């Protein structure tokens, strides 16, 4: 096992689970990832294998049929899976965020209804905040839910849903103008929207147009979601009360940012593995390129960034597991890990030289996947805003 990305203080059960996931990645994901990615093919066999391992219920409590593991355990598993293929980790990330939202904010009836089937993977989750005309500006959401007697009518267009086609439960953030507050953040509500998997009209008033064609992050389905008079009830309000959606979603995004940091750590380690292996095989000017000081310095820089990002991700997960607010730590971990990942992947690409540009080499796939981590769950600029504001809370000069 690599000396990099070791985690102190793990229990025997955690270490055993990670070993099983690592073996699954080596045997079931790495051999097929590049071929499936080039075909943009959904990895159904891999997903079925993760269901059997209980990965979809990793953090769902045992009382609901899950494994009841910590955020740290989940993040370390995600790190291993992303090392194999980053898209696969995306398949479970949005599912996990919806499960987390239900656990933290759902009513008892909602938990009993959804969590046992989410633990087995029978119900697959996706969540939706973004829209075509906005990215991180959540307050500008236009999709609305309007009261009509005992029902709500949802109308609008959502964007960038990971698992948008394969999911059958979507947590959707919409505007509910009920006059409860002048603050735009207190007029947002999360609805639990049920639909059938697939594309086209997947439920009354719900259309999933199709997969968005992307430069990377293939295999996983990224979609739009069109709501055209979709009717639902109070029972589908997350937590049973309108107006709490922004705070619910931000809580979910905090753990989502730990997940993105973990994914970046996994991709970084794979890029380092590919780079250090190629450097020991390729010869130039009569010797292995690893014997050239320039390449050795590059490998040293890559390994240092792989290790630093991992340790920040672990800290962010442990702070959340301790029941503390972790927006500062999660923002730092996501920002650093994503930026370092992009750099480590590019350095591995450079080590490969011209061959790195060939689709026959795995680094070509990683080179197209890494940019998604720079923007997923908030851009670097958004992370810096969060980090800066939180720092001022702690370091503001007292008058």
Image (spheres, rainbow, N blue to C red):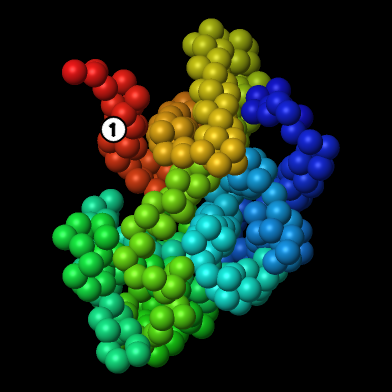
**Quick one: SS at disc 1?**
helix
Position of residue 231 relative to residue 198, above or below, is: below
Task: Pinpoint residue 353: horizontal percent, then vertical percent.
Answer: 48, 28
Task: Pinpoint residue 246: horizontal percent, then vertical percent.
Answer: 34, 58
Q: Quadrant of residue 156?
A: bottom left
Confirm whether residue 195 shows in the render: yes
Of 120 and 388, the residue lying toward us: 388
Q: Quadrant of the N terminus?
A: top right
Indicate left or right for 221 with 282 as reference.
left
Of 376 and 300, the residue lying toward us: 376
Of 103 and 144, the residue lying toward us: 103
The residue that appears at 34% across and 70% down in the rendered structure is: 242
Q: Quadrant of residue 121?
A: bottom right
Confirm whether residue 262 shows in the render: no
Most distant residue in the front direction: 399
The residue that appears at 59% across and 49% down in the rendered structure is: 85
Task: Pinpoint residue 31: horizontal percent, then vertical percent.
Answer: 69, 50
> Mark 1 highlights which residue?
389
Indicate left or right for 51 with 283 as reference.
right
């Amino acid at each position: 096992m690599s000396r990099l990305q070791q985690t102190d203080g793990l229990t025997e059960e955690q270490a055993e689970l990670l070993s099983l996931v690592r073996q699954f990645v080596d045997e079931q994901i790495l051999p097929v990832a590049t071929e499936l990615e080039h075909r943009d093919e959904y990895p159904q066999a891999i997903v079925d294998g993760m269901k059997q391992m209980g990965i979809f219920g990793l953090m769902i409590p045992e009382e609901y049929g899950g494994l009841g593991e910590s955020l740290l355990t989940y993040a370390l598993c995600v790190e291993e899976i992303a090392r194999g293929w980053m898209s696969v980790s995306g398949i479970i990330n949005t599912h996990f965020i919806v499960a987390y939202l239900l656990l933290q904010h759902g009513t008892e009836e909602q938990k009993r209804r959804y969590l046992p089937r989410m633990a087995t993977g029978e119900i697959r989750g996706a969540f939706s905040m973004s829209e075509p005309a906005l990215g991180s500006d959540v307050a500008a959401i236009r999709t609305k839910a309007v009261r009509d007697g005992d029902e709500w009518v949802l109308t609008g267009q959502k964007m960038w849903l990971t698992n948008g086609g394969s999911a059958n439960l979507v947590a959707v953030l919409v505007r509910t103008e009920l006059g409860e507050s002048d603050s735009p953040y207190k007029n947002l509500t999360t609805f639990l929207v049920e639909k059938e998997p697939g594309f086209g009209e997947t439920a009354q008033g719900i259309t999933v147009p199709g997969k968005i064609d992307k430069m990377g992050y293939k295999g996983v389905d990224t979609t739009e979601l069109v709501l055209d008079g979709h009717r639902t009830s109070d029972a589908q309000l997350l937590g049973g009360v309108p107006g709490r959606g922004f705070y619910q979603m931000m809580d979910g995004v905090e753990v989502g940012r730990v997940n993105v940091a973990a994914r970046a750590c996994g991709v970084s380690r794979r890029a380092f593995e590919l780079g250090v292996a190629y450097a020991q095989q390729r010869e130039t000017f009569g010797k292995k390129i690893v014997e050239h000081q320039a390449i050795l310095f590059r490998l040293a820089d890559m390994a240092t960034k792989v290790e630093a990002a991992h340790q920040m991700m672990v800290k962010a997960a442990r702070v959340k597991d301790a029941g503390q607010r972790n927006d500062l730590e999660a923002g730092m971990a996501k920002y650093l890990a994503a930026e370092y990942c992009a750099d480590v992947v590019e350095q591995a690409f450079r080590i490969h030289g011209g061959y790195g540009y060939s689709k026959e080499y795995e680094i070509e796939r990683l080179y197209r996947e890494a940019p998604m981590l720079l923007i997923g769950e908030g851009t670097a600029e958004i992370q810096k805003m969060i980090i800066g504001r939180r720092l001022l809370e702690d370091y503001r000069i007292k008058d």
